[in-house]
């Protein structure tokens, strides 16, 4: 009986874990359904994007090293990702070796907790390393990378006047807003605390003219 119960528990536990599909185009919405979130006036409440989950390292601060007139750069909040599941090293999206000729150089990431090392790699040789890094310096792991030439939907919080909450819905293509597809809409709290637009349903938990606390009940329609 204990064995049967354990199997049942493991089945339920595993079914609640949704693994990300790596290196395949997918639709990603943030925040997740059921997650309580808080944003401030002018911030995006809900984002739906097309892109890929990749294995990345993201510096939480900018690091620079200068040698022989060349600046070796690791930009803050800019993910450096493996190009495929079999990639050994990571590739930046910006020139990370800047001199008379600026180039992209591969990046390696090795070490143990609290003593990670990030280096640039040229001709298989590691150099210009940043050492003794930890989780406060670098975020490492699966990261969603938005495809710049794809379609994106957002809802932004635009403030409150008495019982009226204001929002702005926008669509983006190729990184630019589609002017004809931006809409303002409102929710009257005296009639309820649910906002619904373009398939997205949001429960308003608390709001003032500075911030809003909410929970996503359903994301945008995903037939992009």
Image (cartoon, grey):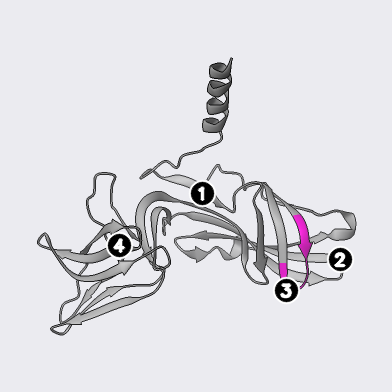
Query: Which circle, 3 or 1, is nearer the viewer?
Result: 3
The residues tagged by marks 1 and 2 sit, at their Cα atoms, a distance apart of: 32 Å
Residue 223 in the image: state x and y as whole percent: 55, 42
Mark 3 / mark 1, whichever is N-terminal? 1
The residues tagged by marks 1 and 4 sit, at their Cα atoms, a distance apart of: 30 Å
Residue placed under numbered mark 2 in the picture: 163
Residue placed under numbered mark 4 in the picture: 116
Residue 172 relative to residue 97: left or right = right
The numbered mark at residue 28 is 1
Placement of the N terminus among the 4 image quadrants = top right
The residues tagged by marks 3 and 4 sit, at their Cα atoms, a distance apart of: 39 Å
Query: Which circle, 3 or 2, is nearer the viewer?
Result: 3
The residues tagged by marks 2 and 4 sit, at their Cα atoms, a distance apart of: 51 Å
Depicted 224 relative to depicted 143: above or below = above
Residue 152 in the image: state x and y as whole percent: 52, 56
Q: Classify mark 4: helix, strand or loop.
A: strand
Query: Is residue 85 at least partly visible in the picture?
Result: yes
Depicted 59 relative to depicted 68: above or below = above
Query: Which circle, 3 or 4, is nearer the viewer?
Result: 4
């Amino acid at each position: 009986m204990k064995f049967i119960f354990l199997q049942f528990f493991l089945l339920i536990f595993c079914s609640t874990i949704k693994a990300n599909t790596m290196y395949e185009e997918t639709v990603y919405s943030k925040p997740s359904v059921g997650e309580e979130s808080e944003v401030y006036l002018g911030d995006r409440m809900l984002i739906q994007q097309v892109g890929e989950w990749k294995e990345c390292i993201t510096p939480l601060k900018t690091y620079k090293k200068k040698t022989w007139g060349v600046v070796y750069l690791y930009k803050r909040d800019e993910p450096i990702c493996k190009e495929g599941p079999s990639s050994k090293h990571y590739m930046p999206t910006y020139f990370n070796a800047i001199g008379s000729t600026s180039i992209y150089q591969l990046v390696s990431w090795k070490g143990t907790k609290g003593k990670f090392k990030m280096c640039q790699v040229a001709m298989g040789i590691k150099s210009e390393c940043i050492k003794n890094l930890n989780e406060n310096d670098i975020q490492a792991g699966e990261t969603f990378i938005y495809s710049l030439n794809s379609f994106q939907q957002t809802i932004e919080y635009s403030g409150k006047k008495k019982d009226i909450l204001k929002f702005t819905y926008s669509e983006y293509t190729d990184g630019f807003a589609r002017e004809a597809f931006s809409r303002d809409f409102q929710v009257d709290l005296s009639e309820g605390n649910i906002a619904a637009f373009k398939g997205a349903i949001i429960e308003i938990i608390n709001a003032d003219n500075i911030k809003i606390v909410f929970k996503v009940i359903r994301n945008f329609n995903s037939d992009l």
